[in-house]
Amino acid sequence: MKKTAIKGMSLLFVLFVVAAFATGVQAQDAADNENTTAGYAALGAGVALGLAAIGTGMSQGPIGAAAVGMIAEDRSRLGHAILFTALPETIVLFGFLAMFVMPGLAA
């Protein structure tokens, strides 16, 4: 198996363990239920931002390498290189949006 497939399977296993643990947690009364809901919302917001940042980091590496190669061949393509390098940052912005919206949904 490739290393990428092994990493993907290990990530799925970790997500499965987190989901199994989260379903086993139960609140005792209404106050605990509200705290648990707020905690899960914060956890979900953090996971959304973290995964968005990881995806951006994984995509910017090859894009940056290609941008440097493109600039080395033709210096007039600097604007295109900056644009292509900055495009993945929008993924992190969506992660920030989810981070601020998700706790509001729990209320």
Image: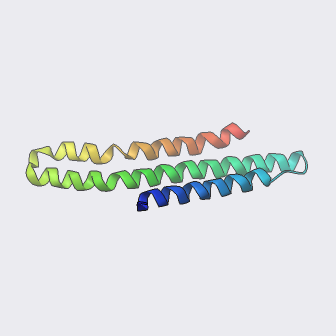
Identify which residue, 52 or 35, lies in the foreground: 52
The image quarter containing residue 76 is: top left
- Quadrant that contains the C terminus: top right
- Quadrant that contains the N terminus: bottom left
Residue at 61%, 58% in the rendered image: 14
Residue at 37%, 45% in the rendered image: 88
Q: What x and y, as percent, mark residue 64?
A: 26, 54
The image quarter containing residue 20 is: bottom right
Residue furthest to the right in view is: 29
Residue at 16%, 47% in the rendered image: 78
For this view, does 1 lie left or right of residue 67?
right
For this view, does 18 lie left or right of residue 7?
right
Identify which residue, 43 or 93, lies in the foreground: 43
Residue furthest to the front in view is: 1
Identify which residue, 15 or 40, lies in the foreground: 15
Q: What x and y, as percent, mark residue 103?
A: 66, 43
Residue at 41%, 60% in the rendered image: 2
Scheme by which the image is coloured: rainbow
Q: What x and y, as percent, mark residue 12?
A: 57, 54
Looking at the rendered structure, the number of numbered marks drawn on it comes to 0
Q: What x and y, as percent, mark residue 73?
A: 9, 51
Above or below 13: residue 52: above
